[in-house]
Image (spheres, rainbow, N blue to C red):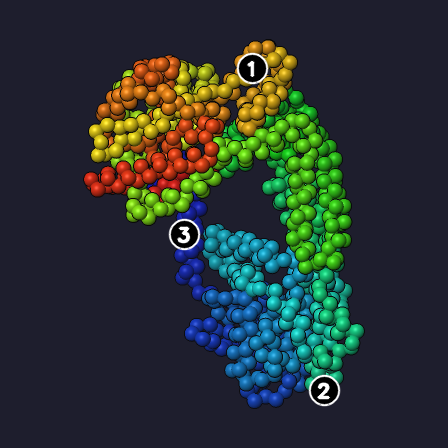
Amino acid sequence: MALPDLRRHGRPSFLALYLILLGASHAWRMQARPHGVEAVADQRLTIGDATTMAFSDTGEPGDQRPAVLLLHGSPGSSRDFGAILAHGDEALRWLSVDLPGFGSSGRELDDYSFKAHAAYVEALLDARGIQRVHLFAFSMGGGVALNLYARDRTRVASLILLSSIGVQQLELLGDYDLNHALHALQLGGLWFLHEGLPHFGALDDSVFDLAFARNFFDSDQRPLRGILEVFDEPVLILHGEKDPLVPYAAALEHHRIVPQSELRSFPEGHFLLWQRGAELAAICGDWVGEVEKGKRPRRVGASVTRLERASLPFDSLTQPEAEGIVWLLLIALLVAGTFIAEDLSCLGAGILIAQGRLGWIDGVAACAAGIFFGDLLLYASGRWVGTPLFARRPLRWVISPRSLAHAEHWFARRGIAVIFITRFIPGTRLPAYAAAGMLRTPFLTFTAYFLLAVVLWTPAVVSLAAILGAEGLARLQEVRYAGAVLLLLLSLFLFLSLRVVIPLASSKGRRIWWGRLQRVRRWEFWPAWLFYVFLLPHLLRLSWRHGGFHTATAVNPGIETGGLLGESKAGVLDAIGRGRPELASYVYLPENEGLEARLERIAAAALAVPLVLKPDVGERGRRVQICRRADELHARLAADPSAMLAQEFVEGLEFGLFFLREPKSDRGRIFSLARKILPELVADGVSTIEDLILGDDRAVCLASFHLDRFDDRLDEIPKAGERLRLAELGTHCLGAVFQDGSDLNSPALLAAVETILEDDPEFHFGRFDLKAPSEDDLRAGRDLRVLELNGLSSEAAHIYDPKYSLAEALECMRQQWSLAFEIAAVQRSRGARPTPALRLAGKAVQHLFRASR
């Protein structure tokens, strides 16, 4: 396989340089020996086959002094306890460890969780002959200490929690799944920094290494509440009132659910271990001494009042206002959320305000800032980069070319007011602001209008959510265990209010919603995947009977995948015979060819506008365009680099003719014949084009498509009797009406079709899209012009006639697929090779990728 050219204009590209540096960095790291951080630990214990744990122990096996085990946080190591060890009571036996993955301990672990660390610590205690130990746990070390207690309650004499984690509900966002997602993002980001950047080992021993991220990602904090609720031994809780990492509210909750515990607070934050090392050493010594003398109560010795408070369930509605890193996370998530869904972020801010987790100013400011700067980026993108940027992935997935064109037309008609109006019409903002940049709206004018709209919109939505949320949350006191579900329902209600209730207040909105309901009720408007769900059992039976679904691809041996997916339209037409007069003239335009070269190909084929441009690989009329003017043709060719066909535009009536030829028969037959009617509206001289579309019971079912197409004329009032054609292409999903045309079938028509296929004897199954001057000409097989020939994936188009029920359509499709498998099975017995299943799966993935563009 040839390597890609990594040079541009004769010089190495940035990508090439980056890859070279990255390879060199990985090579350096592979030969370099990880040295770990300098630590207090001076001894080493091998656990299992390969895991090593560094530790220090001021005693020896058999030492009878009370033992204190110091457990560091994440990231961290035993050297974090330097001050405590330096000032520690010599009457105590002090142990400190580098938990596996940290410090000087082994780094290659399958499990970095504090549950796994508890097992490692237990193995160390066994090796050192320590049967009972006092635990001093800092930060994440609290999780290790509690899991050690869960493994063997008799081993723990007491517990000191310093700035320690505990209950899940007060950690970060308060929910395991949300926190786990954050930790996954953290792990992914750090993994990219370590493995995707050429750092030559500089990050391998940094504080925030992968062990730190794995520790959080692998750990499950949910069981810690249950362990605390049954903890019997004396507990001392030391916590800073301004802790930005583990909120002081967590210490209060730990103190509540462990009724024998003592809480001592400090005015500092999370890092008391470094700020008050000597003092903590003294506190620890005194505490252990009192526990050893029996002066500190166990759970059974707690007061009745404390025990009653400890028995109460956690009240999720009394969570304190977010502080520190939690506050930053919530603000960051709200700001980031506006880049995805502005309304939902505002609703989320309102719920957080109602919960008391955020202040009103904080919530509104976060949403407003995200909306403001995010949409300014859209404006800048449109102004500085323009249309080509939005014609490519991934932006075309967010803003379709059609919606962008719609916004440009709207902007041209209504001017700067659009900036203000679209703030209050969901779904129109992204294309409108990009269009504002493309049309070079003055920046200060844009910013002024936009800022005014944001200032009015954001507080209103956030406040509405907060008011309704507060009322809803007040009602949750009696059903707190269903709170999460009810909050979700509340958010859904607010969202639907904006998206459904408000539009229903106008006649236009009501008609659009009526059209949407009709699309649900009338199966002909269903998406193809939903229709095929009903066919799936039959397809599975056929696949089982014939040795796999891929067998069907042998139905047309001369077409790639039998015409199921991925086949070239040009290749299929070439197989019929390029020079046949029945084929509409066409020319193939290769991918990534320049505009001039494409125009030369079109001219060489003696083609001129009007022309039809269509993807060489496509379906259901996607990205098919009739170019009636040279400027339209040039614009499409310049903007779309994909392989396509340029085909002459043929006047006349369009039909869909499904032909099949069983291998055992000398003659084929017409399985289905359908008229393709391009619907029209007749003006009354009073109604606007928008009113005419919304007033037609069929057109309103495709309202968004028709309104976009006539966007620049929606306010126009056509003259009475003027006819407006709603569709230009004979494609059902693009507005064409299909009607059963079986009355047009005739021996002459069949003979004409077989004549067209006389040079392609391997075609047995598929649908012609063709045109004829009139129905009489079609019936006589006269003056036919073939536009396309589709294979296995084509459908008998007459089933989309509104007179056919879903049951009738499904029965026809069952017959069609049964015939496809029967023909394919005969072809296979004659030596035709179906597309291998793995290759077919790959084609399916490519097809889905193309469909998303």
For the residues labelled 2 and 3, say whether their Cβ atoms are less than 8 Å apart: no
| Relative image position of residue 483 (x, y in whole percent) | 68, 55
Q: CA separation, marks 1 and 2?
A: 99 Å
* Amino acid identity at mark 2: Lys
Res 485 visible: yes
Nearer to me, 421 or 836: 836
Under tag 1, what secondary structure?
A: strand
Return the disc, 2 or 3, that comes first in the chain's sequence. Answer: 3
Q: Position of residue 242 (x, y in %)?
A: 74, 61
Q: Residue at x 73, y 83 (%)?
A: 290
Local crowd at mark 1 within 10 Å, few (<14), some, or many (≥20)?
some
Task: Name the residue located 23 percent from the left edge and 34 percent from the top edge.
Answer: 663
What label does residue 59 carry, if any? Answer: none
Q: How many marks?
A: 3
> Mark number for residue 682?
1
Q: Earlier in the sequence, mark 1 or mark 2?
A: 2
- Left or right of 143 in this view: 50: left
Q: Amino acid at mark 1?
A: Val
Q: What amino acid type is highlighted by mark number 3? A: Gly
Mark 2 secondary-structure assignment: loop
Q: Is 357 situated above or below 652?
A: below
Residue that carries the numbered disc 2 in the rendered image: 293
Q: Which residue is mark 3?
A: 23
